[in-house]
Each structure stands twice: as C-alpha cells, then as structure tokens.
Image (tube, rainbow, N blue to C red):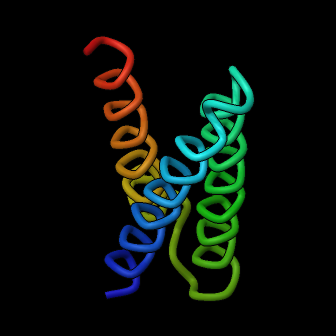
Amino acid sequence: MRTGQFLLAGILLMAATLIVGRLFAPLQSGALQAVALGATLLWLCVAAANLWFGVTTAGYSLAGELPVFLLIFGVPVLMLAGVLLFWNVL
C-alpha cells in the first residue's frame, strides 16, 4: 500500500514538473530540463528517505528495501524521461 502511494506521489510530481516546465519553456530555453533535473533530485531524496526509514525504523533489511527503492525512484523518473524524449523526438 505504501509503495503504491509513493509511486502515485512520484508520478504526480513528475506530471507537475512537466506542466511547470512547459509553462516556462517559452520564456527560458532550458526551463524544462532544469525543472526536470530539480524534480528528479528532489524525488531521489524522497526515495532515499523512504529507504532509510524502512531500514532503520520499520526493520526491513537493506537487501529487502533496495528493490522497493529502485521501483519508487525508477518508475516516475523513467516516465518523465520517456515523455521528454517523446517531446524532443516528435
């Protein structure tokens, strides 16, 4: 349940990133890339904090939490990268 909530939050953050980046893209040439990088770094911190919380407080092993971290971090970031690639190619 918690993993699903984190995935949804990450996807919503990346969607908001795309919206804000598209709004400011006509004003600043690198706005979309800068906003995407900032959101990716923010999401890396959130996912790492979730990993740390799972290992230290919830009692999970690092080996058990690492795949969850990769899922929570990777899916939203790969979706963001896919949309950015789609926009740049087409």
Assign the C terminus to one quadrant of the image.
Answer: top left
50 is higher (above) or lower (below) than 27: below
76 is higher (above) or lower (below) than 6: above
53 is higher (above) or lower (below) than 33: below
Q: Nearer the viewer, residue 83 or 66?
A: 83
- Report whether 5 appears left or right of 57: left
How many marks overall?
0
Residue extending farthest front = 26
Q: Nearer the viewer, residue 81 or 66?
A: 81
Residue at position x 52%, y 68% in the image: 61
Hey, which quadrant is residue 88 in on the image?
top left
Residue at position x 60%, y 66% in the image: 51
Residue at position x 43%, y 67% in the image: 12
Q: Nearer the viewer, residue 43 or 61?
A: 43
Residue 76 image offset from top left, x and y in percent: 40, 51
Hey, which quadrant is residue 64 in on the image?
bottom left
- Report whether 23 appears left or right of 10: right
Residue at position x 43%, y 59% in the image: 72
Assign the N terminus to one quadrant of the image.
Answer: bottom left
Q: Nearer the viewer, residue 8 or 83?
A: 83
